[in-house]
Image: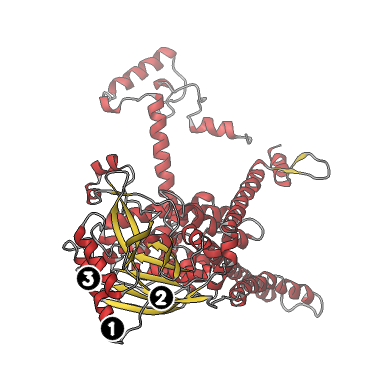
């Protein structure tokens, strides 16, 4: 303990030691010169005590444990309030940066903002404490997710705010990690790794994760997109984040250079012009020194951006298949999109019958396969003869198999349903099927249903839980071997990857976005199909009940698309490919490696911080722990 600390403690306590509480006669406020006898002192104290009013019952001293707990609570609240006040400007800047990041995603699509906002968060957390970094990360993440997920307001704004709060906790952890690693050498590299680590965690927990808002999904039309063919979405995220952190390092170097030059000008003004050759060489050296980090940071950002242009994206087809995508539309958008029973099914049947008439009239090409969207049959065709008859009618009229989306009862467990894609043959009827592997929590099943339904009555609108499938959606549909992916599954890396590795020559995304029509959610899901096309070297067909249906080439370009809430048919010749990309070969290895590097960087930051706090260092020459110069200086001052 430093000298004088005991004296300071006693002074704060009125000159008493910590274990000697004041008596009334020893109060610092009433104690005067000790000139009288002890009896007089006691009489004076008694008179003073008599003049004091009685202590109310609710103001009497509480127990020591309760007082300590109250003090701790008050201290935490006080520290939190102080943190908020001190960080007000930084918090506002972080919130604005988070809102700007949301503009990098559809429906806005301003992808360069993803780089600038990564740089902004790096600067805002640099040199801060872990607690301050966590708060800055939360202030960045919550507005970002509120803006990004505002389409969820169809369910309720409480759902938007609640989900945004949960997701922003991951960004708070990211902010804390960025603050910790910002003191390490080569900090831009570790910062980019931490963005991948944050997405790795957010894609998996809780309840299987929620991958919305990944940096890769904001860069499906940027120079970084081709990198998906090498390392998937995580490599695209890393490249975008590394460019952002490199720009942050360049901004710091530029600021430092400005300070050096300003200091040089001030010195010349104070001391006059230096003698020729006396200080000119050091001045030039000092001016050059900040240029090195500036130029190296800009070079790093340029090289990472240019790397995407050097990656070839193969598109050559081994075979082709003619397809027709039917978008039958719904009666109304929102939570009640189903309308009357069989309304959606009739829409898709009628649109397919119209296609069959145009084929017979020579106004449309005969397809090899017709693709319907998710929930295109709003009744279980295995249980409802009316639904089965109508699907049979459409398949026989067009003369080719139809990939039908339907909800069917689970065959073995009562009370559960399966979200399926069913190959419906015009002669044999229903055949092979795929069951959605990743149902959406609180959308297609309710975790802890018995407990939560008592508190959140809205969950009763989901009467039955969806049963997850246990295999990939590789289906032989006519001459084509397609991989079926249903709705939100396109956002998860492992499901499309496993489907392609099991032999899918093209991908089909059956989806129903009628609930979130005209909110920006269909556009956000469409760019995921674009990224998956490049990542796996496969054409991706999206069939949506109310839009946006699309055909995306293996290079990630949109060949055709529909508008929302219109009845339409897309006809296309689909390229079929057998070669798999490097991203499919290496799988999740790049993501794990990059994320682990970020975790190790955090461990290194913790270790160096702990060594700095203890004031000890390890000397390689002697093999002993020695004191640092700072600690020796402090001990010298104490002596």
- Tell me where residue 435 sits by quadrant: bottom left
In the picture provided, is 321 more to the left or to the right than 349? right
Percent across and percent down for residue 110 are: 44, 75
Assign a secondary structure to mark 2: strand
| Circle 3 or circle 2, nearest the eye | 3
Query: Would you say residue 486 is visible in this rendering?
Result: yes
Q: Is residue 587 above or below residue 52?
A: below
Give the residue at x 22% y 48%: 460
Mark 2 touching mark 1, by CB under 8 A? no
- CA–CA distance in space, label 3 to label 2: 21 Å
Give the residue at x 44% y 23%: 22
Looking at the rendered image, the quarter that the C terminus falls into is top right
Looking at the rendered image, the quarter that the N terminus falls into is top right
First reached walking from the N terminus: tag 2 or tag 1: 1
- CA–CA distance in space, label 3 to label 1: 20 Å
Assign a secondary structure to mark 3: helix
Give 521 or 140, whichever is nearer the viewer. Answer: 521
In the picture provided, is 114 more to the left or to the right than 147? right
Q: Is residue 564 above or below residue 486?
A: below
Query: Would you say residue 546 is visible in this rendering?
Result: no
Assign a secondary structure to mark 1: helix
Give the residue at x 61% y 63%: 188
Percent across and percent down for residue 136 are: 46, 56
Give 575 or 591, whichever is nearer the viewer. Answer: 575
Q: Local crowd at mark 3 within 10 Å, few (<14), some, or many (≥20)? A: many
First reached walking from the N terminus: tag 3 or tag 1: 3
Q: Which mark is residue 551?
A: 2
Mark 3 touching mark 2, by CB under 8 A? no
List the residue tagged with mark 3.
347
List the residue tagged with mark 1.
360
Give 432 or 132, whichever is nearer the viewer. Answer: 432
């Amino acid at each position: 303990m430093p000298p004088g600390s005991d004296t300071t403690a006693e002074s704060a306590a009125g000159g008493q030691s910590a274990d000697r509480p004041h008596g009334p006669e020893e109060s610092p406020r009433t104690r005067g010169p000790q000139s009288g006898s002890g009896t007089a002192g006691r009489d004076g104290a008694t008179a003073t005590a008599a003049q004091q009013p009685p202590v109310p019952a609710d103001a009497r001293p509480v127990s020591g444990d309760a007082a300590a707990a109250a003090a701790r609570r008050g201290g935490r609240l006080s520290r939190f309030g102080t943190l908020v006040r001190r960080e007000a400007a930084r918090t506002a800047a972080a919130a604005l940066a988070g809102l700007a990041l949301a503009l990098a995603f559809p429906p806005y699509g301003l992808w360069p903002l993803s780089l600038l906002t990564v740089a902004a968060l790096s600067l805002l957390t640099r040199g801060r404490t872990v607690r301050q970094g966590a708060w800055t990360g939360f202030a960045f993440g919550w507005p970002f997710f509120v803006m990004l997920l505002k389409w969820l307001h169809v369910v309720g704004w409480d759902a938007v705010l609640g989900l945004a709060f949960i997701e922003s906790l991951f960004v708070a952890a990211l902010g804390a990690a960025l603050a910790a690693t910002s003191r390490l050498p080569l900090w831009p590299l570790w910062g980019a790794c931490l963005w991948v680590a944050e997405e790795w965690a957010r894609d998996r927990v809780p309840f299987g994760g929620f991958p919305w808002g990944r940096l890769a999904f904001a860069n499906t039309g940027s120079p970084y997109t081709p990198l998906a063919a090498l390392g998937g979405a995580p490599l695209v995220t890393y490249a975008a984040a590394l460019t952002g952190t490199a720009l942050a390092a360049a901004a710091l170097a530029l600021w430092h250079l400005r300070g050096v030059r300003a200091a040089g000008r001030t010195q010349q003004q104070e001391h006059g012009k230096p003698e020729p050759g006396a200080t000119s060489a050091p001045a030039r050296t000092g001016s050059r020194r900040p240029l090195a980090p500036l130029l190296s940071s800009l070079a790093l950002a340029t090289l990472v951006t240019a790397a995407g242009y050097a990656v070839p994206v193969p598109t050559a087809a081994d075979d082709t298949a003619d397809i027709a995508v039917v978008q039958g539309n719904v009666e109304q958008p929102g939570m009640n999109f189903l309308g009357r029973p069989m309304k959606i099914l009739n829409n898709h049947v009628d649109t397919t019958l119209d296609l069959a008439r145009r084929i017979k009239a020579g106004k449309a090409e005969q397809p090899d396969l017709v693709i319907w969207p998710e929930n295109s049959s709003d009744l279980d065709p295995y249980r409802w003869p009316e639904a089965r008859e109508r699907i049979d009618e459409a398949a026989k009229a067009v003369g080719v198999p139809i990939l039908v989306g339907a909800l069917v009862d689970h065959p073995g467990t009562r009370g559960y349903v399966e979200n399926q894609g069913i190959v419906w043959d015009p002669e044999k009827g229903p055949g092979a099927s795929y069951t959605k592997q990743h149902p959406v929590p609180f959308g297609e099943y309710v975790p802890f249903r018995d407990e939560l339904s008592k508190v959140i009555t809205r969950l009763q609108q989901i009467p039955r839980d969806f049963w997850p499938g246990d295999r990939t959606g590789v289906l032989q549909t006519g001459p084509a071997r397609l991989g079926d992916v249903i709705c939100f599954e396109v956002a998860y890396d492992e499901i499309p990857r496993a489907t392609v590795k099991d032999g899918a020559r093209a991908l089909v995304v059956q989806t129903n976005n009628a609930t979130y029509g005209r909110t920006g959610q269909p556009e956000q899901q469409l760019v995921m199909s674009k990224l998956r096309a490049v990542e796996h070297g496969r054409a991706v067909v999206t069939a949506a009940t109310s839009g946006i249906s699309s055909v995306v080439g293996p290079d990630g370009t949109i060949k055709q698309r529909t508008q929302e809430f219109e009845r339409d048919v897309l006809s296309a010749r689909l390229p079929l490919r057998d070669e798999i990309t490097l991203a499919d070969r290496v799988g999740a290895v790049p993501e794990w490696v990059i994320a682990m590097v970020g975790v190790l960087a955090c461990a290194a930051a913790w270790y160096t911080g702990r060594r700095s706090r203890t004031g000890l260092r390890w000397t390689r020459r002697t093999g002993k722990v020695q004191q640092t110069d700072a600690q020796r200086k402090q001990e010298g001052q104490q002596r």
